[in-house]
Amino acid sequence: MTTYDIIFYLFAAVTLVSAFLVVTNRNIVHAAFYLLFTFFGVAGIYVMLGADFIAIVQLIVYVGGILILLLFGVMLTNKITSVDIKTGTIHLLPASIVLGLFSGALAAIILNTNWTQVETKTAEGTTAALGNLLINEYALIFELLGILLLIAMVGAASLARR
């Protein structure tokens, strides 16, 4: 087992454990903080796969935008910080059956597949190639999407003002 494998398994374990804690935790603030670790684990896996642009977008959009907005929304609302999330265990038996079937099918697929070892090259960065495509090939579409997002932002601000 190489260092790459150990780091990958570490990121995978952080992602899975924190995602499990997000789903099972009853305190919404703690669940939001566990979601932070889940997003960082996914970004780490993206880096390990050589998708540096997607990893940075994951950090900027999800960690920097959505999660911080969620945390501020929860923390600035006085009545929601001490509220427990209601988790109904009504559908526990059907969920367990579906989980067992899915896990069995997944294990059968993994065990019955002939895996081959492929020589891997060092991953080159994808950000430069995407930047060249956005500036050269798709410049008009990129600018039109920017204008569309600006119009949507102005519309949302005018609706919120009323």
Image (cartoon, helix red, strand yellow):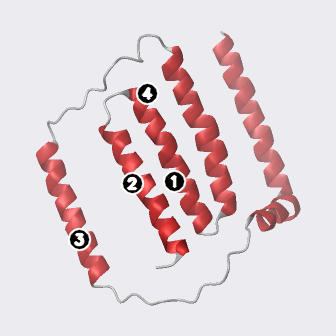
Q: CA distance from mark 4 to mark 2?
A: 19 Å
Residue 90 picture quarter: top left
Find residue 105 and name its label: 3
Between circles 1 and 3, the one closer to the viewer is 1
The numbered disc on residue 16 is 2
Give the amino acid type for the residue marked by disc 1 in the picture.
Gly
Q: Residue at x 46, y 61 (%)?
A: 10
How far apart are the two marked residues, 1 and 3, measured between alpha carbons? 26 Å
Q: Quadrant of residue 16?
A: bottom left
Q: Of the residues under marks 4 and 2, which one precedes in the sequence?
A: 2
Q: Name the N-terminal-most of marks 1 and 2.
A: 2
Q: Are marks 3 and 2 in contact (CB under 8 Å)?
A: no
Q: Where in the figure is residue 48, as x and y percent of width and height?
A: 59, 67
* Disc 3 versus disc 2: nearer the observer: 2
Q: Which residue is mark 4?
A: 29
- The residue at the point 53 percent across, 29 percent down is 70
Q: How far apart are the two marked residues, 3 and 2, measured between alpha carbons?
A: 19 Å
For the residues labelled 1 and 2, say whether their Cβ atoms are less than 8 Å apart: yes
Other-residue count near label 1 (Cα within 10 Å), few / some / many at <14 / 14–19 / ≥20:
many
Report the residue marked by disc 1: 41
- Say what secondary structure mark 2 lies in: helix
Residue type, numbered disc 4: Val
State yes or no: discs 1 and 3 in contact (Cβ < 8 Å): no
Give whichever of discs 1 and 4 has the lower sequence position: 4
Amino acid at pointer 3: Ala
Secondary structure under tag 4 reads helix
Q: Height in image: 121 above or below 151?
A: below
Within 10 Å of the Cα at label 3, are there few (<14), some (14-19), or many (20+) other Cα atoms?
Answer: few
